[in-house]
Every structure is written in C-alpha cells, then in structure tokens.
Image (tube, helix red, strand yellow):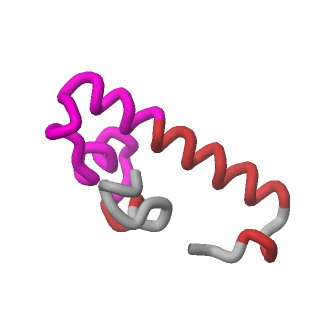
Amino acid sequence: MVNKTSLSPRIVRKREARINHILDTALRCMTETGVEGLSMHEVAGRLDLTVGALYRYFASKGEL
C-alpha cells in the first residue's frame, strides 16, 4: 500500500472516493449474484479496470 502520510490531501480524497466506488460496485455485484458470484474479475469488469489495478486497492477478494 501507499504511505498516506506522503500524499497530498487531494490525492487522499481521490483515493478514498475510488475505494468507495469499488466497494459500492462490489456490493451491487454481491446483491445480484451472491457472495459466490463475487470475483475480482467481475468487479474489475464492471468498473472498467484491469484486475491488476483493482489489486492496488485490495489485496484479495476477502479483503474486498
């Protein structure tokens, strides 16, 4: 993870907004398909991100 103390407040706000968007998308995915249907690939696809980009924010499906 990135050391938050070295980031500007603007970057921290943008990162937090991105994390919240990822979590909202994951929650929508779970309500539609259940926990079994949740995957990093599904969430990344819905966000138009690569799976690798998603792993920059969450280390695993369990963490997500």
**Residue 4, x across and y down, in percent:** 73, 69
In this rendering, the answer to whether 11 lies above or below 28 is below
Task: Return the residue found at the far left.
Answer: 36
* Residue located farthest toward the right when viewing the structure as drawn: 9
Horizontal side of 21 relative to 58 (left or right) equals right
- The number of numbered discs placed on residues in the rendered structure image is 0
Where residue 42 sits: x, y (%)?
24, 44
Position of the N terminus by quadrant: bottom right
Q: Residue at x 15, y 39 (%)?
A: 36
Q: Is residue 13 left or right of residue 58?
A: right
Dominant secondary structure (helix, strand or loop) of the stretch shown in magenta: helix
50 lies above or below 26: below
Q: Would you say residue 42 sits in the magenta stretch? A: yes
Residue 53 in view here: no
> What residue is drawn where x is 81% and y is 55%?
10
At a point 32% along the width and 39% down the height, the residue shown is: 46
Give residue 22's position: percent from left, percent from top: 46, 43
| Residue at horizontal 23 percent and vertical 23 percent from the top | 32
Question: Residue 15's x, y, as percent?
Answer: 64, 54
Q: Is residue 47 above or below residue 55?
A: above
Q: Which image quadrant is residue 30 in?
A: top left
Q: Is residue 35 magenta?
A: yes
Q: Which residues are magenta?
A: 24-50
Residue 34 shows in the view: yes
Residue 6 lies left or right of residue 56; in this view the side is right
